[in-house]
């Protein structure tokens, strides 16, 4: 991807990942400061070392979402750059044989991107599964605490678990959102190739476009958990909905 990196200044695009990382850290910091204030109000003199250790464990769990988010954001930014690179040359007035050469470079860069992401996915998908289990348990617990706070008319006990649950869900969603954005870029690439195919009059160039489209169809940027559950926003919302329903059922028996 050397030539593509140089033509699009990909390093500049990747700076967006660090900005997102800073935004995530800021969000976590605000949430954790609020949590310390709320815990101090709830426990008062009983805010001891065990409570502090439990809070630090929660901070560690929240921070563990950031590597996944950064990896998938880099994947999305790279896919976006590939689409820009492809559109730039498809819309130019260069010779057909030069366009064919750029299509080959695009396919090689696309393959390298998928290979790099797949290597990280082997670990990330396992981690994400346990994150989903954590989100399920966390949301169930937090919803119970929200209702407990409402019954006790305690503002801090009501909003602390609510803020914690929303932060946990949001941070879990970030990486999956970037996966969906990558899928959107993939669909835009296919659309651009389809439009080029309509305008194409050269037989050899037509074959090159078809070969590119076939490769994209064979290797789409789609990821699943154990080839069963699609790794997208619907999976996260499904877990959250189950957690909410489960919490409501539990509360109905209390």
Image (cartoon, rainbow, N blue to C red):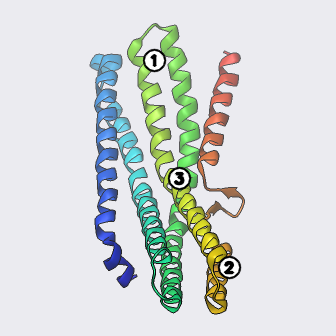
Left or right: residue 66 versus residue 148 is left
Vertical side of 212 occupied by 184: above or below: above
Q: Residues within 10 Å of mark 3 (few under 14, many from 20)?
A: many
Element at label 3: helix
Q: Which one is in front in this view, the residue at disc 2 or the one at disc 1?
A: 2
Mark 2–mark 3 contact, CB under 8 Å? no
Which residue is at 38% across, 36% downward? 54
Give the residue at mark 3.
Answer: 176
Q: Secondary structure at mark 1?
A: helix
Residue tagged 1: 158
Question: Nearest the camera: 253 or 184?
Answer: 184
Quadrant of the image for the N terminus? bottom left
Residue 176 drawn at (x, y percent): 53, 52
Q: Looking at the rendering, which quadrant does residue 167 occupy?
A: top left
Residue 216 image offset from top left, x and y in percent: 63, 75
Question: Dot 2 corresponds to which residue?
Answer: 214
The residue at 33%/64% (across/down) is 14
Which quadrant does the C terminus fall into? top right
Identify the residue shown where x is 48% and y is 85%. Answer: 102
Residue at the image position 53 percent from the left and 83 percent from the top: 103
Q: Position of residue 250 (x, y in %)?
A: 67, 23
Distance, label 2 to label 1, CA atoms, is 54 Å
**Mark toward the start of the polypeptide (3 vs 1):** 1
Q: Is residue 159 above or below residue 171?
A: above
Instruction: Please say whether residue 32 is visible from this viewpoint.
Output: yes
Mark 3 or mark 1: which is in front?
3
């Amino acid at each position: 991807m050397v030539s593509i990196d140089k033509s699009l200044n990909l390093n500049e695009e990747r700076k967006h990942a660090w900005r997102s990382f800073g935004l995530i850290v800021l969000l976590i910091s605000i949430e954790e400061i609020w949590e310390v204030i709320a815990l101090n109000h709830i426990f008062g003199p009983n805010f001891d070392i065990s409570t502090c250790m439990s809070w630090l464990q929660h901070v560690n769990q929240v921070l563990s979402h950031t590597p996944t988010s950064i990896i998938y954001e880099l994947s999305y930014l790279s896919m976006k750059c590939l689409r820009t690179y492809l559109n730039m040359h498809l819309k130019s007035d260069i010779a057909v044989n030069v366009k064919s050469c750029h299509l080959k470079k695009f396919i090689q860069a696309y393959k390298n991107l998928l290979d790099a992401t797949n290597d990280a996915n082997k670990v990330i998908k396992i981690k994400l599964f346990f994150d989903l289990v954590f989100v399920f348990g966390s949301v169930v617990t937090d919803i119970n605490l929200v209702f407990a706070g409402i019954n006790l008319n305690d503002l801090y006990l009501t909003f602390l678990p609510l803020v914690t649950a929303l932060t946990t869900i949001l941070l879990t969603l970030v990486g999956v959102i970037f996966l969906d954005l990558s899928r959107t870029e993939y669909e835009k690439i296919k659309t651009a190739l389809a439009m080029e195919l309509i305008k194409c009059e050269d037989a050899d160039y037509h074959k090159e476009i078809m070969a590119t489209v076939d490769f994209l169809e064979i290797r789409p940027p789609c990821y699943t958990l154990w080839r069963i559950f699609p790794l997208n926003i619907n999976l996260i919302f499904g877990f959250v909905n189950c957690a909410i329903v489960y919490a409501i059922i539990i509360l109905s028996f209390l």
